[in-house]
Amino acid sequence: MRIIVHSDKCQGHARCWAQAPDIFKLDDEGYILPGDIEVAERDQLLASRGARSCPERALEIDCTADALLARLLFNQACGGFK
């Protein structure tokens, strides 16, 4: 999963950071640092909560088709989706 950062929309509320301080990095004034964020699978729930908490919609959750396909293949290999 990837979080697309629209830093021009950030107003410095820091709600994302409050949800997941290890994922969302802020500058000294509380604004999100530019650059997209690659999120490890174990951190996806926290990252999603943080991104959705932004009142300015400065953070966009990108679940690429590759990630969805990987999950589907994993589930099939484990006996799911018969």
Image: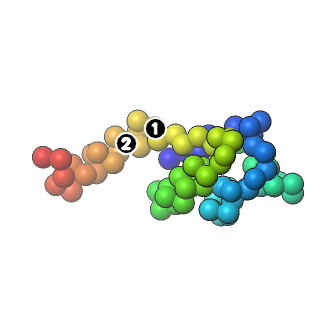
Q: Are marks 1 and 2 in contact (CB under 8 Å)?
A: yes
In the rendering, at what x and y percent does residue 49 appear? Answer: 55, 55
Query: In 3D space, how far apart are the residues under numbered discs 1 and 2 (Cα atoms)?
Result: 7 Å
**Viewer-closest of 59 and 2:** 59
Residue annotated with mark 2: 68
Residue 4 found in image quarter: top right
Q: Residues within 10 Å of mark 1 (few under 14, many from 20)?
A: few
Residue annotated with mark 1: 64
Which dot marks residue 74? none
In the rendering, at what x and y percent does residue 50 appear? Answer: 60, 55
Residue at point 87%, 57% (across, down) = 28
**Vertical placement of 16 versus 7: above or below?**
below
Protein image colouring: rainbow
Residue type highlighted by circle 2: Leu
Quick check: 72 left or right of 14? left
What secondary structure is found at the residue carrying circle 1? loop
Residue at point 75%, 49% (across, down) = 32
In the rendering, at what x and y percent does residue 69 appear? Answer: 34, 40
Residue at point 62%, 62% (across, down) = 19
Q: Which residue is most to the right?
A: 28
Residue at point 49%, 58% (across, down) = 45
